[in-house]
Amino acid sequence: MKKKLLFLLMIFVLTAGGCGSIGSPAASSQESTADSTAPSVQTAETDGFEESEADISSTEGIPDSSQDVLPTEHISDPAGGALPGETGENGGDAAVPEAPQTSAPGKKETQAGPLQTAAQEKTEAESAAEHMTMAAAEENQIHVTFSVDCKTAVEKGSRIAQAAAPDGVMYSPAVMKLEKGATVYDALMNSGLVVKADSSPFGVYVSSIQSLREKDPDCGGKSGWLFIVNGVVSGTSCSNYVLKDGDTVQWRYTCDMGKDLQ
């Protein structure tokens, strides 16, 4: 048994000697080799570290793509102009396009539509019809010079005449428009004076104008109203005398059957 253990011990020693021990030449040689190769490995690692730093430094200043930051000089207005703050080719702010001018507030340019045109045509037609009506009316009208006076009654001292017309003029001479076929009586009624008239088989007889009646107490029994056309006293009724264009009609008060009228 002891021999067997001794034999195994020898085999172990021999085996360890062949592989090299801490103090053996083989171990020294391996250590020397390791020392000689260590600097190169460290240099390689150092060079790799320096290259990594260089790569990192070269990427400084590059914006992160995750932030999606776009430079403003590449942004343009959809309308084709530069945005405010954008620089032009020569520096400075680029010109901003002006908005198109519009009409002042409250002032609208309108175009006549069908309704407005129709209204204008209607107005023009009505105006033309009115002118035609007026022209036709002018053709159916006459112009006469009309007047009323009671000067003889005022001179006689008639109180009624003096109260009605102190100067003896009840209606100053003026041109009056009448329809064709108008009579002397129509002209008197058109004057607006207060008239009292009586009808008879021979026509209308005017007995009072402005309260001055025939046979005035201060003028006598031969006083009354007469009408004169174109300077001639007519012997017919005023309602039967048809006037013509350009006639002159006078109503005058007489105190002596017309003999005192000049």
Image (cartoon, grey):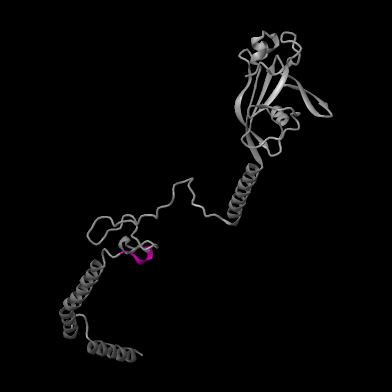
Instruction: State the image quarter where residue 150 is shown.
Output: top right
208 or 90, nearer to the observer: 208
* Residue 25 visible in the snapshot: yes
Residue 65 covered by magenta stretch? yes
Instruction: Name the residue rendered at 43%, 52% in the picture.
Output: 102
User: Is 37 above or below relative to 83?
Assistant: below
Quarter the C terminus occupies? top right
User: Is 48 above or below relative to 64?
Assistant: below
The spot of residue 118 in percent (x, y) is 61, 54
Magenta stretch in the rendered image = 63-67
Instruction: Name the residue rendered at 26%, 63% in the picture.
Output: 61
Residue 97 appears left or right of 241: left
User: Is 47 above or below relative to 165?
Assistant: below
* Residue 192 visible in the snapshot: no
Residue 224 covered by magenta stretch? no
40 or 14, nearer to the observer: 40
| Farthest residue, direction right | 201
Residue 84 appears left or right of 49: right
Residue 143 appears left or right of 242: left
